[in-house]
Image (cartoon, rainbow, N blue to C red):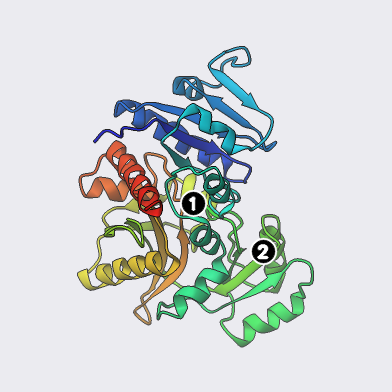
Amino acid sequence: MKVDNKILVITGGMSNEKELSLISGEDVARALIDEGQKIEVLEITDEKKMVLYRDPLLFIERKKNICNNERIIFFDNLDLASLREYNFGVAFLALDGTFGEDGHVQALLDLADFAYTGSGIMASSIGMDKSKSYEYVSCRGINVPEYFIVHRHDYNLNESIIKIKKSFGFPCVVKSNDSGSSIGVTAPRNDSELQKSLMEAFKYSAVAIVQKFIKGREFACGVLGNANYAKLEILPVAESVIKNFAIFTNHQKYYAKDTEEICPAKIEITLEKQIMKNAELVHLILGCDGLSRSDFRYDESDKKVYFLEVNTSPGHTKNSICPQEGRAIGMSFGAFILKQIDLALIKKRLQRI
């Protein structure tokens, strides 16, 4: 499938997940080049500026001296509307974390009247806020871990300890309420470790979420499709096996050698169907578009599946979980990228009718 539009790959960003975004941007750019697409790459920098690589190979090889190349254009602000003169038909968002998947860049793209991959402002902002997404999905019967939130500006350690001991006890899980890639996730086992865990979570967000530790297996399931505009395609379930670790931290997700991802997961059909159904419901409840990935824990003691979080802009390195799920049904990485671009164009076209 070839898209009859010039594609802008947007990558980088200002979050603590920027490096992952850049790897995704490289892999997406290479895949689209291999598919024969016309593309350019926009890198958003830490300084809230933009760099447009009119030749995508210059982005892929950006470690070389690029300052005097006429095919690279530097912008002093984040005025995405100024890119309209370059006649891009659609933007592929290879962005992670704050600004990239929380609704901010989506709002700028809407104002600039760009078609773009992934969810819009509302689904992106709710999906990024773990406690809000818990409220939404639990109202529709999806299990979520017991939890409470702690605000950095007025938190009381003793109060938090009392809450934990009265409800789910130690060990528990502590993470920032609106950060991705498992950054800042810890599993404190006692009072003193809890304080360290909260301080770690507060590095990345003003709000921490403290929740019951669900002992069991960890699964992920991607969904392709626009909630209001297209039939959904539920991707195979993947399992993350975390050897010698209790929880899936950022280190285990990207760097540990003894973390194994199995796709498709080797599970009984009833559990597979339950996870896939829940992932589909999350996508629909939040109104996600393009690609979403929901993460779950299966408690082998009570035989229940618990929703952990939704990613409205999952990682797009060629080895990320959702591309693995696509390959499991015979979809190449390039076809997986082009499918999302097609969904973005469908959504934009129907919005204009």
The first of marks 2 and 1 along the sequence is 2
| Residue drawn at x 29%, y 29% as measured from the top left | 35
Residue 136's x, y, as percent?
49, 74
Look at the image and tell me whether residue 27 can be seen: no
Q: Residue furthest bottom?
A: 166
Q: Residues within 10 Å of mark 1 (few under 14, many from 20)?
A: some
Residue type pointed to by label 1: Gln
- Please tell me whether residue 190 is drawn above or below residue 64 in the rendered image: below
Q: Position of residue 39 (x, y in %)?
A: 41, 28
Where residue 229 appears, as percent x and y from the top left, is 33, 58
CA distance for labels 2 and 1? 17 Å
| Residue 197 numbered mark, or none | 2
Residue 223 in the figure: left or right of residue 70: left
Q: Residue at x 50, y 44 (%)?
A: 113
Identity of the residue drawn at 59% across and 76% down: 170
Quarter of the figure that contains the N terminus? top left
Q: Please, what is the three-letter code of the amino acid marked with disc 2?
A: Ser
The one nearer the camera, 48 or 173, is: 48
For numbered disc 2, what is the local secondary structure?
A: helix
Please provide percent x and percent y for residue 40: 46, 27
Q: Which residue is mark 1?
A: 252
Q: Quadrant of residue 288?
A: bottom left
Above or below for 287 versus 61? below
Name the residue nearer the viewer: 47 or 24.
47
